[in-house]
Image (cartoon, rainbow, N blue to C red):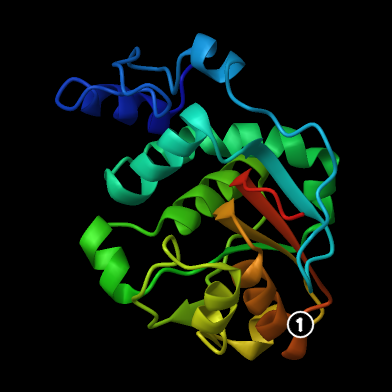
Amino acid sequence: MYSRRELLRAAASLIVPNRCPFCDVVVGAFEYMHEECFDRLPRITESIVPPKGIKELYACFWYDGAARDAILRLKDGHYIHSAEAFAPIMLEVIGGAVMRADMITAVPSSLFMKLRRGYAPAEAIAKEISRRCGINFAVTLCTDKRSEQKRLNAKERAENVRDAFDLVDKMLIQGKNILLVDDICTTGSTLSECARVLLENGAASVSGAVFAATSLK
C-alpha cells in the first residue's frame, strides 16, 4: 500500500522522471535509486572521531565515487529528491540512537543559496529523516554566509564559518538533545560551529549525521 506522498511523487514522475542520484539514470516511479548503485558506494566501516562539540558523528559513505556525485547533484543539480534516497540510508546507520534525539535540525543554507537552488540540501535531508522516524524537525539556526567552502583548506574553512550562524529561537533548544544533519562533513568546522552556537545557548547535547565524509585524520 503506497502512501499519499509516494503516489504524488509517482504522478510527478510522469512529467519529470525519477532519477537515481548515484548514476543519473531514470528509475521506476516508486523507486529512489538503483540497488546496484547502492551496492557500489564506498561505505564507512570504521569509527570517525567527531568534530569538536559533536557528541557522536554518524556518517554513511566516504566522499568519493558515486557518493560524491550524488552530493554534487543535490547541491548543484537541483536534485531535491536525492534527500528521499539519502534519509533511509542515514537512518539505518544512525540506528536506534536516533531515538535519543529530542529534535532534528539541519546546518542552514543562506537565503541567497536557498533561493538559487530552490531548497536547502541539509534541511531537505533532515525533514525526510524526521518524517520517517517521527522526531520533530525544527529550524534552529540561520546564516547569511554566501561563500561556499569547497575550494577552501581546513584553516580557511574554520575562519569562513566562525560566527557565521545565528540562533533562531533560544527557547526552542533548551535542554534538548539535538541531531544535527548535513550532507557532507569535510573538516568538521561547520558542524563544530553549529554545535557551539547550540550548546552555548542551552542545548544539552549535539550529535551529527551526514551522508558522506572525507577523512578527518
SS for callout 1: helix
Instruction: Tell me, yes or no, if residue 137 can be seen here.
Output: yes
The image shows residue 36, relative to residue 77, as above or below, that is: above
Amino acid at dot 1: Leu
Q: Residue at x 71, y 82 (%)?
A: 196
Query: How many discs mark residues in the rendered view?
Result: 1
Instruction: Examine the image and state in which quarter residue 199 appears.
Output: bottom right
Q: Name the one closer to the observer, 135 or 212.
A: 212
As drawn, is 100 to the left or to the right of 191?
right
Q: Residue at x 69, y 81 (%)?
A: 198
As drawn, is 17 to the left or to the right of 138?
left
Instruction: Tell me, yes or no, if residue 140 can be seen here.
Output: no
Percent x, y for residue 180?
66, 62
Q: Name the one closer to the observer, 156 or 8.
A: 156
The image shows residue 142, relative to residue 85, as above or below, that is: below
Percent x, y for residue 133?
67, 43
Instruction: Examine the image and state in which quarter residue 53 appears.
Output: bottom right
Percent x, y for residue 68?
48, 38
Q: Residue at x 44, y 81 (%)?
A: 143
Badge 1 density bin: few <14, some 14–19, many ≥20, Cα 10 Å: many
Percent x, y for residue 179?
71, 60
Q: Residue at x 77, y 54 (%)?
A: 217
The image shows residue 178, relative to residue 214, as above or below, that is: below
For mark 1, what is the residue? 199
